[in-house]
């Protein structure tokens, strides 16, 4: 019989005493996921702008493609990336397998479809005349695109949060291309699986609690930020 | 001096030609009105002049320089277009008005002053910090006008700037248009449906129909000699073409088709064009006896909310535009397809 209660108590002790291994994993996870989202933003934003603002042949197919990729099992993507990064794979020469860079790249690829889908929906909801408006006021093509993104700000933020949530909570990619090396490439999800397998339940439970806290925390901050913005607007502009 | 010129300009979307072989010179300092029915290509023509749509064929020249894909972005700085449907950035009034100035890299100290000046012109002083999209429809359109005139471009393009506005807001905007033309010598091209605007503001009128410019001339010319086109194209609300005949009672009856006969006071015979001011038409739910010589029964086919006013289209065989206050509209309990009587005096009908 596994001592669950004991594990929980010990888990809280670990959290409370600021165990360096525990918080090392948390810090690494946050870092990897953040950089992954930034990377996905870098290549996802132009694609989202393109498929939502330009009318071209095959646009619907590209949208459907990204939409269907949202649901891809992370293990399958992890396997594909493993094959690409492995020594005999096309990118094997980079020597990225089992490095933090592999996890970051892998998670960036993983969250790209969700980022593009949410962002392009948000951009499509913006009044199509905003682009022309910015242009007739003197904006260049790229300045006009930025004006459109600003109008879609809520959707852009949502796409980032959703991407971050997906990156932080996934297991397959981090496990297969990161290798779950303690202190180097282990993240919250992979570390939980490792500690559980080893029977070190206190650590697994502590990590599980922290992961949940982070995910909840992000969503609370998001809701608060929306409320704060609303309150701020009301305060500045009493009706 | 010519500010802008269109040479054989055609714009097609797929196999639909929206602007067809248009040649037009816009003189420096003039106000030119584009008059034409919905779908005649006015908006597309304005977008081509604003250099935000490239023509399918033909040449656009700006101050004698041919516009190309290369220089369009630069030349676009010299003109600006105010859209018919008010479009605002979802931010403060200040950010909206400052947008184009910031793109032109106007220094901060001058920026505030320019924004304040533009807002004063449209009578929205002190509105800087208000969220633009929370303003009333008329105020929003005034912000859009302020945002355009703040740039002091050589060419100002206006797409039905006062359509769907109540007379108070419309008057403010008309004043601004006249003022920037008079004081800053801004060249203005505006599309309009409004008879009085077309008569009072512009120096020249271009009549547009089915993508073509059919006539260009002074308001006196267009409303005089060319009035047949004006009525036939329904370029402005409540203009009708018909045949005038004398009645036994010595008045004049004009048959405008579909069984609609309008009594007028003018002693004209033969082919004429008529105009009835939407504000001169009285609505009633039953046929009331009155001094109005023209009473017709019809159905409401369109309702447009203009804030304190409501604009209705009533089909009595021919479509009439009627403007009434929101209060009367609510008290009369009107709806789409409501049966209604319209009435107006013979002396309210202008025979062109």
Image (cartoon, rainbow, N blue to C red):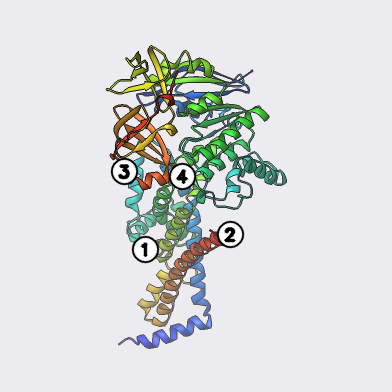
Q: Residues within 10 Å of mark 1 (few under 14, many from 20)?
A: many
Residue A236, label in figure: 2
- Residue that numbered label 1 is attached to: A172
Residue where numbered disc 4 is placed: B308
| Residue that carries the numbered disc 3 in the rendered image | B335
Along the viewing direction, whichever of A60 and A198 lies nearer the viewer: A60
Kindly indicate whether the residue at mark 1 contacts the one at mark 3 (C-beta within 8 angstroms). Answer: no
The quadrant of the image that shows the N terminus of chain A is bottom left
Measure the alpha-carbon separation of dots 4 and 1: 61 Å
Q: Secondary structure at mark 2?
A: helix
Badge nearest the viewer, 4 or 1:
4
Q: Residues within 10 Å of mark 3 (few under 14, many from 20)?
A: some
Above or below — where is A34 with respect to B62? below
Please rate how many residues cluster around mark 4, counting C-alpha atoms within 10 Å: few if below 14, some from 14 to 19, many from 20: few
Helix, strand or loop under label 3: loop
How far across and how far down the image is residue B114, in percent?
Answer: 67, 42
- Callouts 2 and 3 in the same chain: no
Mark 3 vs mark 1, foreground winner is 3
């Amino acid at each position: 019989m596994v001592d669950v209660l004991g594990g929980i108590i010990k888990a809280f002790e670990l959290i409370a005493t600021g165990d360096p291994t525990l918080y090392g994993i948390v810090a690494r996870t946050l870092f990897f996921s953040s950089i992954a989202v930034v990377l996905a933003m870098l290549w996802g934003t132009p694609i989202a702008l393109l498929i939502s603002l330009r009318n071209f042949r095959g646009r619907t197919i590209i949208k459907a493609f990204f939409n269907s990729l949202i649901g891809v099992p992370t293990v399958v993507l992890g396997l594909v990336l493993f094959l690409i990064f492995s020594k005999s794979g096309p990118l094997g020469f980079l020597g990225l397998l089992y490095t933090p860079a592999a996890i970051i790249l892998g998670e960036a690829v993983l969250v790209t479809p969700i980022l593009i889908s949410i962002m392009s929906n948000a951009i499509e909801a913006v009044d199509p005349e905003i682009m022309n408006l910015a242009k007739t006021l003197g904006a260049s093509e790229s300045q006009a695109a930025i004006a459109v993104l600003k109008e879609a700000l809520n959707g852009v933020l949502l796409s980032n949060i959703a991407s971050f949530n997906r990156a932080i909570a996934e297991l397959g990619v981090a496990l297969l291309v990161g290798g779950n090396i303690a202190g180097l490439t282990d993240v919250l999800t992979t570390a939980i699986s490792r500690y559980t397998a080893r029977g070190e339940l206190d650590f697994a439970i502590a990590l599980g609690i922290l992961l949940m806290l982070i995910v909840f925390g992000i969503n609370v901050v998001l809701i608060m930020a929306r409320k704060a913005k609303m309150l701020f607007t009301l305060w500045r502009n009493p009706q | 001096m010519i500010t802008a010129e269109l040479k054989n300009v055609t714009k097609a979307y797929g196999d639909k030609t929206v602007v067809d072989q248009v040649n037009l010179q816009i003189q420096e300092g003039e106000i030119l009105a584009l008059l034409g029915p919905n779908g005649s290509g006015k908006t597309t023509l304005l977008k081509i002049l604003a250099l935000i749509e490239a023509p399918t064929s033909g040449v656009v020249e700006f101050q004698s320089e041919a516009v190309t894909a290369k220089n369009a972005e630069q030349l676009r700085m010299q003109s600006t277009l105010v859209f018919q449907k008010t479009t605002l950035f979802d931010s403060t009034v200040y950010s909206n008005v400052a947008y184009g100035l910031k793109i032109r890299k106007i220094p901060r100290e001058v920026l505030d002053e320019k924004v304040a000046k533009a807002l004063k012109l449209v009578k929205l002083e002190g509105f800087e910090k208000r969220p633009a999209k929370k303003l009333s429809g008329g105020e929003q359109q005034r912000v859009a006008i302020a945002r355009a005139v703040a740039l002091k471009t050589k060419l100002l393009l206006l797409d039905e700037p006062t359509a769907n506005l109540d007379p108070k807001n419309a008057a403010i905007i008309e004043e601004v248009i006249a003022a920037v033309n008079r004081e800053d010598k801004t060249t203005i091209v505006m599309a309009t449906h409004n008879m009085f605007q077309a008569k009072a503001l512009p120096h020249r009128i271009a009549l547009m129909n089915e993508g073509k410019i059919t006539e260009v001339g002074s308001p006196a010319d267009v409303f005089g000699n060319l009035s047949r086109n004006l009525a036939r194209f329904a370029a402005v609300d409540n203009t009708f073409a018909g045949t005038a005949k004398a009645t036994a009672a010595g008045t004049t009856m004009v048959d405008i088709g579909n069984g609609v006969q309008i009594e007028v006071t003018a002693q004209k015979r033969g082919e004429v064009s008529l105009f009835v001011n939407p504000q001169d038409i009285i609505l009633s739910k039953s046929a009331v006896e009155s001094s109005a010589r023209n009473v017709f029964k019809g159905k409401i086919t369109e309702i447009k909310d203009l804030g304190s006013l409501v604009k209705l289209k009533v089909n009595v065989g021919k479509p009439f535009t009627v403007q009434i206050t929101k209060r009367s509209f609510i008290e009369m309990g009107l709806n789409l397809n409501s049966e209604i009587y319209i009435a107006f005096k013979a002396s309210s009908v202008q025979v062109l």
